[in-house]
C-alpha cells in the first residue's frame, strides 16, 4: 500500500520569503503522479502543482516549484516570494496510474505567512 | 459551469439518524469520489465510482453507502449516523484518461451529536 508522509505539521514564514514544504512517499510502483493541494480557510481544495513520475524535469507553476527525487521518494514544494494568500493547509498526494486512480493524501501541513 | 457542487454545506444529526449527502458535477467526468477529512488525518477515501454504474470501497467505507445515480451525480448515505462520523466530507471528480487531476467540491461539515 502506498503511504504519504508530511513530517512538519506546521510552519510559518515572512511575506516575500521562500519556504519549502517536505513530503515523502512509499510505493513499489514506478508509474504514478504526485500532487500538492492547497486548502485555504475557505475549505476549498485547490491543486497547486502536479508531477508525473516518468518526467525527470521538476514541475513549476509561477511561484511554486517542486524538487522531485524519485530514488529518494521525496517530493518537496518550494514557494517563492510568499504572499499572505498562501496561508493555508497544504497536502501532498500520490496516485498510482495503473490502479484505481485513487488519491492517497498526507496528513497535511499548516503554513502561515506573516506580514 | 459550476464544477463540483455539494449539498448541504452544513448538517447536524442526532445519533441514529440517517441522511444523504448529494454531489453533482457538470464537467462530464467519468470518475467520482467521496472523502472525509478529520483533524490531523488528511483526506481519506470512503468510496469511489470509476464510471457510471460502478462503485468501490475506499479506505474507510464502514457506515456508508453510495449511489452513482447517473454520470453527473454521486450520493453518500449514512444509514445510522454515529459521533465518529462527525467530519468534513468532500466529493471530487476526474476525467478518465486525463492528467489525473481531481476537482473538489466545497465540502459538507457534518456534526453528529
Image (cartoon, coloured by chain):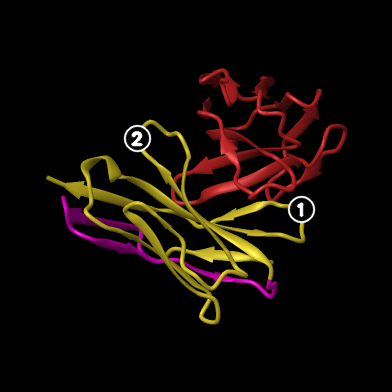
Q: Is residue A10 magenta?
A: yes
Segment tinted magenta in the rendering: A7-30
User: How far across and down, in percent of the image, does residue B40 sit?
Assistant: 44, 51
At a point 72% along the width and 43% down the height, the residue shown is B61
Quarter of the image for the N terminus of chain A: give it.
bottom right
Chain identifier, colour yellow = A
**Where on the picture, by quarter, is residue A105?**
bottom right
Count residues near mark 1 (Cα–Cα under 10 Å), then give few for <14, some for 14-19, many for 20+: some
In front of the other: label 1 or label 2? 1
Q: Is residue B22 above or below residue A47?
A: above
Quarter of the image for the C terminus of chain A: give it.
top left
User: How far across and down, in percent of the image, does residue A108 sit?
Assistant: 43, 53
At a point 45% along the width and 66% down the height, the residue shown is A23
Q: Earlier in the sequence, mark 1 or mark 2?
A: 2
At a point 39% along the width and 66% down the height, the residue shown is A22
Q: Is residue A91 magenta?
A: no
Amino acid at each position: 500500500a502506498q503511504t504519504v508522509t508530511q513530517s512538519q505539521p506546521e510552519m510559518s514564514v515572512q511575506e516575500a520569503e521562500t519556504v519549502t514544504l517536505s513530503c515523502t512517499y512509499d510505493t513499489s510502483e514506478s508509474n504514478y503522479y504526485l500532487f500538492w493541494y492547497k486548502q485555504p480557510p475557505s475549505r476549498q481544495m485547490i491543486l497547486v502543482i502536479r508531477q508525473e513520475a516518468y518526467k525527470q524535469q521538476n514541475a513549476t507553476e509561477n511561484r511554486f516549484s517542486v524538487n522531485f527525487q524519485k530514488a529518494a521518494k521525496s517530493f518537496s514544494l518550494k514557494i517563492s516570494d510568499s504572499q499572505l494568500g498562501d496561508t493555508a493547509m497544504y497536502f501532498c498526494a500520490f496516485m498510482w496510474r495503473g490502479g484505481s486512480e485513487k488519491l492517497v493524501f498526507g496528513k497535511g501541513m499548516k503554513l502561515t505567512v506573516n506580514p | 459551469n459550476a464544477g463540483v457542487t455539494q449539498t448541504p454545506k452544513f448538517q447536524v444529526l442526532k445519533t441514529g439518524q440517517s441522511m444523504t449527502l448529494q454531489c453533482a458535477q457538470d464537467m462530464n467526468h467519468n470518475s467520482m469520489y467521496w472523502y472525509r477529512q478529520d483533524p490531523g488525518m488528511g483526506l481519506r477515501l470512503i468510496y469511489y465510482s470509476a464510471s457510471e454504474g460502478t462503485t468501490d470501497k475506499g479506505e474507510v467505507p464502514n457506515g456508508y453507502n453510495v449511489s452513482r445515480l447517473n454520470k453527473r451525480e454521486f450520493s453518500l448515505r449514512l444509514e445510522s449516523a454515529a459521533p465518529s462520523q462527525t467530519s468534513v466530507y468532500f466529493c471530487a471528480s476526474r476525467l478518465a484518461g486525463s492528467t489525473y487531476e481531481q476537482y473538489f467540491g466545497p465540502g459538507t461539515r457534518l456534526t453528529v451529536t
